[in-house]
Image: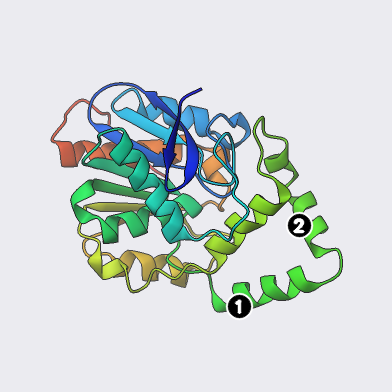
Amino acid sequence: MPTINVNNINMYYEIHGEGEPLVNIQGWGVEITSSSFSAPQIIAEFAKHYKVIAFDNRGVGRTDKPDIPYSIEMMAEDTIGLMDALGIECAHIVGGSLGGCVAQVIAAKYPERVKGLALHGAWDRMPFSTVIMTRILLKLPGSKKRETKRAEMLFQQKYPPTPDSFFRQLYAGLYFDGRKLLGQIKAPTIIVNCKKDQFMPMKITMELARGISGAKLVLLERDHMFIMTEPELVVKPALEFLAEIDGVSGIKKTEIAV
């Protein structure tokens, strides 16, 4: 089982494919072998064109689940630590949902490490109303048990989070505010987000896209779960965009419903 000690945790990772490196960062509570959330399909498609480095974030899968608060910045340092350990100086960075937050921090803090940035279902911050409502709900009696029940699919994965690490990842995403970082992102960027995202209003998507200079925005008539139900809408726009950066021909252009 391939693990590397980085940032004081043992991180599980896999490498698929050959070519230019591409680091794929998973979303909240999802481990890389989870077919229920399309992770293997997404990784396999990217691996047809790139050397994909896929890994389990802290708190899920076969990576350690330390008993401390998590932050997006901490998870970004985990990712950079993995890249260092594998001798990867620069790579395309792909991040979905919570992984998109991690990817933003990497691109802003380590611009020389990021060749291209592809975000999907991403946000630079959660709406204030969502933060307040979540805090209120989680303080109600039995609320954590109810929220864990709602996320039952996450706990049915082969290597699920623990209830504690599940909430540590939740809080990391909930309290992330990347607005001050966006102007520091210099890598060519594509954002694939949804008009019907149940977790964030369109104003957050537009704030993210406008904050990153030159970012390409693709809007889908979907909700946040397109990541697991239609993984091709994650992969195809990213591949086309990254191929342009690499100057590679032969990746078929696709029509994306917007």
First in sequence: mark 1 or mark 2?
Answer: 1
Dot 2 falls on a residue whose secondary structure is helix
In this rendering, the count of numbered labels is 2
Q: What residue type is labelled 1?
A: Ser
| Image vertical order of residue 254 relative to residue 107, above or below | above
Front-lying residue, 18 or 192: 18
Residue topped by disc 2: 147
Q: Can residue 97 be seen in this view?
A: no
- Residue 219 position within the rendered picture, expressed as x and y whole percent measured from the top left: 41, 55
Residue 156 lies left or right of residue 35; in this view the side is: right
Residue depicted at x 37% and y 72% = 179
- Residue 146 position within the rendered picture, expressed as x and y whole percent measured from the top left: 81, 57
Neighbour tally class for label 2: few under 14, some 14-19, many 20 plus, Cα within 10 Å: some
Residue depicted at x 51% and y 28% = 40
Q: Distance between the residues labelled 1 and 2?
A: 18 Å
Front-lying residue, 69 or 215: 69
Residue topped by disc 1: 129
Residue found at the very far left of the displayed protein: 247
- Residue 108 position within the rendered picture, expressed as x and y whole percent measured from the top left: 28, 61
Q: What residue type is labelled 2?
A: Glu
